[in-house]
Image (cartoon, rainbow, N blue to C red):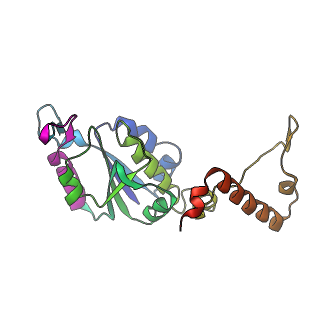
Amino acid sequence: MRIDIITIVPEMLEGFVNTSILGRAQRKGIVEIYVHNLRDYSKDKHRRVDDYPFGGFAGMVMQCQPIDDCISKLTSERDYDEIIFTTPDGEQFCQNTANELSLDKNIIILCGHYKGIDYRIREHLITREISVGDYVLTGGEIAAAAIADAVVRLIPGVLSDEQSAFSDSFQDNLLAAPVYTRPADYKGWKVPEILLSGHDAKIKEWEITQSLERTKRLRPDLLKKD
């Protein structure tokens, strides 16, 4: 998989995408992640990429030209499955979305800033708009990082234990069961006896029961999803 992230603050992402799981995935040759500075595509002598909005609205808006030029350069070099814009009014990002995107070969993620981007870009170039929550961030870099991380860890070979990603919370719309490690007794806080029994079938039954109980108690909305 190849992920191209377009941003006006590349320093926010360069460290993140080159460490931990994302960094290891790249070193293994499983994933390629490129961070592009949108200002490199500005034709303004001060490298500006924003301007005042028509209509007298407050704030600033990211211009068409730099975004169009950057995306056009990338799409002239390869085909992309999705061109994603991170925006508060996009579809809510969830595990199912991450699962879908993990099957793609190439994706672009455009990080929004200011009051957003000129709407013509959304109409003509963007194929998918994604929000990571009902709140506003200074920029889309945090959202882009979250999307990249959630997607890459699902790709076969990225995690040492490939089944681990598919037992995480939100797979099958359930929260994960509690997990424990050694020692079995710490300050009198004990691990459930069933987990020490070695009885795989009973442990699996306990895991399912705990997942359902936690989901009903903490996120009942998940059980209403298809």
Give the answer, above or below, for where 197 lies relative to 141: below
Q: Quadrant of residue 37?
A: top left
Q: Residue at x 49, y 53 (%)?
A: 150
Q: Residue at x 40, y 65 (%)?
A: 104
Magenta span dominant secondary structure: helix
> Is 117 on the left-hand or right-hand side of 208?
left
Q: Quadrant of residue 92?
A: bottom left
User: At which x and y percent is residue 159?
Assistant: 58, 56
User: At which x and y percent is residue 84?
Assistant: 33, 55
User: At which x and y percent is residue 105?
Assistant: 38, 64
Residue 225: tell me if it is visible: yes
Residue 73: tell me if it is visible: no
* In the foreground, 87 or 9: 87
Image quadrant holding the N terminus, namely bottom left
User: At which x and y percent is residue 106?
Assistant: 35, 61
Magenta region = 55-76
Q: Residue at x 11, y 33 (%)?
A: 45
